[in-house]
Amino acid sequence: MIKVENLTKAFGPKVAVNRVSFAVERGEVLGFLGPNGAGKSTSMRMITGFIPPTEGRITVGGHDMLENPIPAKAMIGYLPENAPAYSDMTVHGFLNFTAELRGLNGDARRKAVNRAVEMCFLETVIHQSVDTLSKGYRHRTCFAQSIIHDPDILILDEPTDGLDPNQKHEVRTLIRRMGEKKAIIFSTHILEEVEAVCSRAIIIDRGQIVANGTPAQLKNKSDVAGAVLVRVQGVGAAELKERFAQAGTGRKVLIVKDEANGVTARVYPKNGAVDGELARGVAEVAAAQKWRIEELHTEEGRLDEVFRNITLPETSAAKEERP
């Protein structure tokens, strides 16, 4: 549905997007992640045809965005950042206007507006002017205009920005449901949204793609993925590390907490370790030493850690000491 090849955008000497390539199929929800200034919004503006690329090619539904923009843009619903809208219009008037721009007339337009209002929970503000809306309802209204024509492709820039927790849940549920039949790209700074909604995620930094995979694949890049966290009583930190080293349990042991009432340690897996093998090994060492186990579990990778490691590289020493 979307194919981006070597997409590049330069503003004078500054290269905001540098040879970015990826594809999105129908039924995919692609999360677009990156720190501020990484090139997310610029990429989205080029994909939607809002600004032209300096180099590269964008194909939407088989249509070249530069050579054949009208049918390409007709397939897209776009929610830009900051949710722009005509503040002097009512919600109903604004949605009716955007439906008309999309070529909907008569009964089809009325049904489209009603459907968008219902999907975005705008019934209570339908007759208010846009300038009287809260930030959350204003954002919902602009989300509604992006889906007014039931597009096959959605490009959403920070779709939950300014929403309260309940509204965020509603929008995430809507995106997840629509993503079963559409191709969706949305940018976000909220990493929990990636795990809740996305089938795949791209991390972009300094205008380049630095990671691309499912949330599970990205989490597996975390230092703690597959590590075992164990809390025991009846042993000191130094002896605990020594016993695990003697038993050859794990790649390394890091003491997380050393308190009078117990020691908490993280045991890192060796390369090629079988799932569950490390936890069994840790439990066996503790049992043999007659330590009292208060907690033992295998950790999942942390998406926030992966994001930081990729976009803010640290020294290897700092990574070794991170708890």
Image: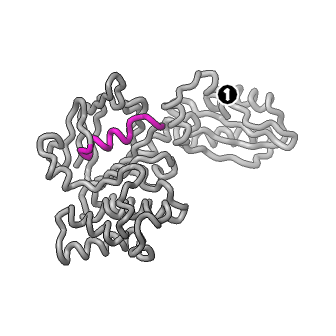
Rendered residue at 24%/60% (across/down): 151
- Relative to 19, say whether 124 is above or below: below
Question: Is 67 positioned to the left or the right of 125 in the image?
Answer: left
Rendered residue at 75%/40% (across/down): 264
Amino acid at dot 1? Glu
Q: Is residue 28 visible?
A: no
- Camera-nearest residue between 237 and 195: 195
Q: Residue furthest front?
A: 88
Boundaries of the magenta span: 36-50
- Relative to 254, say whether 192 is above or below: below
Question: Is 229 positioned to the left or the right of 314 in the image?
Answer: right
- For residue 46: magenta? yes
- Camera-nearest residue between 281 and 156: 156
Question: Is 16 positioned to the left or the right of 252 in the image?
Answer: left
Residue 80 placement (x, y as % from top left): 36, 50
Q: Which residue is mark 1?
A: 321
Residue 51 placement (x, y as % from top left): 26, 40
Residue 142 placement (x, y as % from top left): 37, 60
- For residue 309: magenta? no
